[in-house]
Image (spheres, rainbow, N blue to C red):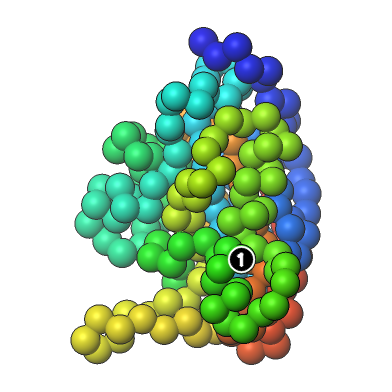
Amino acid sequence: MSDLEPLPSLESGTTGVIEARKNKAITVKKSQSLKLINTHGKQVIDFFAFALDSDLKPLPATTLNFLSMQHTRSGNMRLTPKVGEKLFNNLRKPLFTFEEDTSPGVHDTLAPACDLERYRLLGVQGHHDSCAENLHMALERCGYPFPRDITPAPLNLWMNVPVQDGGALAFVEPVSQKGDFVVLKAEENCLVVCSACPQDITPVNGHGLKPSDCHFEVF
């Protein structure tokens, strides 16, 4: 068992906001479901998850157990998961089941979380909010010991990264609409971190280039 403090659990029926450009840490117990709502229709959520022990305590820093996109692709033999499939951790164990998706089902598992270097390469000078920073700020706030120099690739909900002829990739506007949602059922106790992606240079969050709030519900 971990000597770290347990994280507060959320009762079924808990709702909340994932503010534009910001992060939200959500404790989800085994068998609970997490509903993520694309309130305004074009917002990408970078979805990260980390295992908790049976007492909802973070695992020690020597035990890395997190949602892994490469293992999810391999486990499902698909580029992106669909309803009924699992989201796997780096140990090839399921952390979530993809229960419901009211959107067209276009999500991404290839792109890494945006970070300061990504924005520098896009021409930004100085600080810019990023999903990588959002993740590590949330983990530190929760007391979850995870190496700051490691940022797992997220499940990029509603991010539209089509694979083009010859294997080329593109970043284009999401096809999701207002009110679309996904439901993910926890197969283990998890700390989830959601980042409402702050990308405002490319059309990742729509041609308006304006990140927006999303909402969640635990049940």
Q: How far across and down, in percent of the image, does residue 94 sit? A: 37, 37
Residue lying farthest to the front in this orientation: 126
The location of residue 79, given as percent across then percent down, is: 31, 64
- Look at the image and tell me whether residue 45 can be seen: no
Q: Is residue 51 above or below residue 96?
A: above
Please count the marks in the image.
Answer: 1
Question: Mark 1: few, some, or many residues within 10 Å (few <14, many ≥20)?
Answer: some
Foreground residue, 113 or 207?
113
Query: What is the quadrant of the C terminus in the image?
Result: top right
* Location of residue 145 by image quarter: top right
List the residue tagged with mark 1.
Answer: 116
Spot occupied by residue 196 in the image (x, y as percentages of width and height): 67, 62
SS for callout 1: helix
16 sits to left or right of 154 = right
Q: Write the residue at 48% across / 55% down.
A: 154
Quarter location, residue 127: bottom right
- Which residue is at 37% across, 53% downward? 69
Could you tell me if residue 196 is visible in this image?
yes
The percent position of residue 80, horizontal first and vertical second, equals: 36, 62
Q: Nearer the viewer, residue 140 or 48?
A: 140
In this picture, residue 53 sits left or right of residue 74 = right
Residue shown at 73%/80% (left/top)? 210
Residue 111 falls left or right of residue 57: left
Badge 1 amino acid: Leu
- In the displayed structure, 123 sits above or below 63; it is below
Q: Give the residue displayed 54% in from the left and 35% down from the top.
A: 146
